[in-house]
Amino acid sequence: MPAHSPKKGAASVPSLILELRNEDPRVRERASRELYGLAPMAQMAIPALIDALHDPNPFVRQWVATTLERMALHFGPLLKKAVPGLTELLKDEDFKVREWAAHALGAIGAHAVSAIPALQEALEDNDSSVIEAATSALQAIEKSRCLL
């Protein structure tokens, strides 16, 4: 992943938002990976990333969930709008998408309380990484609820 200076990085966010809608899935995946690296400067990308949770490409969905997980560290409450889409991804056909959706929900914390039933269902997933991520997410949500 290329290193970005804060000025150049922040300036590239609008073009990366456009690339999330490109017809080429490789371009969309690269854009989501670059936004991951720019998370602290990419608040304006949140609505486009939420839309991209429904991307037809599993690699894009995985990177979008991963990026939202990182963005939650900087913009927690703003990601409440991502919770329904991330909750849907807990049933994705791709286990990595399910795993990173759970991680993102855990990072969102108390603002993801509506995802608790779906995360509890994910504890029955056939992939151990999804079960671990769901367990961790449930603990993180509960811990952050206690802090409110």
Image (tube, rainbow, N blue to C red):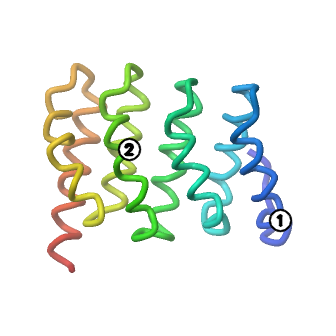
The amino acid on which the numbered mark 2 sits, given as a three-letter code, is Leu
Mark 2, secondary structure of its residue: helix
Q: In the rendered picture of this protein, how many numbered marks are placed on residues? A: 2
Specify which label sits upstream in the sequence, 1 or 2: 1
Q: Quadrant of residue 31?
A: top right
Q: Pointer 2: what residue?
A: 86
Residue at (52%, 49%) from the top-left corner? 50
Q: Residues within 10 Å of mark 1 (few under 14, many from 20)?
A: some
Mark seen at residue 11: 1
* Picture layout, residue 108 above or below residue 50: below
Q: Residue at x 17, y 49 (%)?
A: 116
Q: Is residue 73 left or right of residue 35?
A: left
Say which quarter of the image contains residue 124. top left
User: Is the residue 108 above or below the residue 21 in the image?
Assistant: below
* Residue 127 horizontal side relative to residue 33, left or right: left
Residue at the spot x=23%, y=70% of the render?
144
